[in-house]
Amino acid sequence: MDEERVLSAISLEKDVDGFHPLNVGNLAIRGREPLFVPCAAKACIELLLRSGVELLGKHVAVIGRSRVVGLPTSLLLQRHHATVSIIHAHSENPESITREADVVISAAGVPNLVRRNWLKRGSIVIDVGTTPIEDPESEHGYHLVGDVCYEEALQVVSAITPVPGGVGPVTISMLLSNTLDAAKRACRFS
Ligand SMILES: NC(=O)C1=CN([C@@H]2O[C@H](COP(=O)(O)OP(=O)(O)OC[C@H]3O[C@@H](n4cnc5c(N)ncnc54)[C@H](OP(=O)(O)O)[C@@H]3O)[C@@H](O)[C@H]2O)C=CC1
Ligand SMILES: Nc1nc(=O)c2c([nH]1)NC[C@@H]1CN(c3ccc(C(=O)N[C@@H](CCC(=O)O)C(=O)O)cc3)C=[N+]21
């Protein structure tokens, strides 16, 4: 299947994942408004804003650059005037970048990637990673782990989202919110 052809075939007005090239382009361009922003990226910003975290001028390190999370999150952060560092699988010394960051958003899908010595004291961590780990003890035969060593991070950070019970449920809320917006537009309620 050609991913680009599939994405371009989705009607702009129904693109609740925010994957259509026009929605991505409008998110990237200042002064333009996308119809939809990808849910996980929206969830990260929503968590920060609702917790009273100031983004203007702050250094935010984003680990990951995917269409689903990393890229739209870094674009959205720039719309809030944060200074954004983007870390990916080829980045050298990622810890030297995250150690300078006021906020670290990790979306690599690599358990235990972010250790205590990757984080500045008092920084804020948003852990997007959700990797299923086989666990015969649990109800579904697996449990989810994030990218961040939670117990280690707790010793230095001022706030952190857990996995499970952190970004995941907020992402689902954002999908519902985007879907409601799409329905309202279709019914000309807004
Ligand atoms: N909680 C939630 O609501 C959501 C959770 N997720 C979870 O977030 C994680 C990421 O998802 P997704 O973006 O779709 O995954 P992808 O595999 O598409 O992207 C992973 C990104 O992380 C980078 N990366 C991989 N390994 C490393 C590393 N060792 N160091 C630095 N960067 C690295 C990759 O770099 P490169 O580009 O160079 O390959 C890539 O940009 C997954 O665990 C997924 O399940 C996703 C969406 C929502
Ligand atoms: N276009 C697209 N957008 C996505 O947002 C997207 C995607 N593709 N592909 C897959 C990943 C993964 N993802 C999760 C969302 C919520 C939870 C979630 O809510 N998890 C619960 C726990 C659930 C459990 O324990 O099984 C929690 O974190 O508390 C997890 C993972 C979205 N993703």
Image: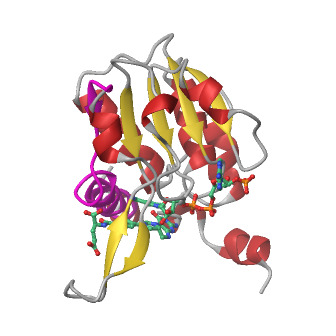
- The magenta segment is 156-182
Q: Residue at x 32, y 31 (%)?
A: 48
Q: Quadrant of ligand 2?
A: bottom left
Residue 176 locus on image (x, y percent)? 30, 63
Total numbered circles: 0
Residue 31 seen from this side? no
Q: Quadrant of the N terminus?
A: bottom right
> Hey, which quadrant is residue 51 in on the image?
top left
Decide if residue 131 is on the left or right side of residue 165: right
Q: Residue at x 26, y 30 (%)?
A: 159
Instruction: Work out whether residue 63 or residue 137 is closer to the camera in this orientation and state it.
Output: 137
Decide if residue 153 is on the left or right side of residue 89: left
Q: Residue at x 27, y 35 (%)?
A: 154
Instruction: Work out whether residue 73 or residue 15 is closer to the camera in this orientation and state it.
Output: 73
Residue 76 locus on image (x, y percent)? 53, 35
Q: Is residue 88 above or below residue 49?
A: below
Residue 17 seen from this side? yes
Does 174 lie within the magenta span?
Answer: yes
> Hey, which quadrant is residue 183 in on the image?
bottom left
Instruction: Work out whether residue 128 or residue 23 is closer to the camera in this orientation and state it.
Output: 128
Color scheme of the displayed model? secondary structure
Decide if residue 128 is on the left or right side of residue 163: right
Q: Is residue 26 above or below residue 81?
A: below
Does 2 lie within the magenta span?
Answer: no
Instruction: Work out whether residue 34 or residue 2 is closer to the camera in this orientation and state it.
Output: 2
Residue 24 locus on image (x, y percent)? 65, 49
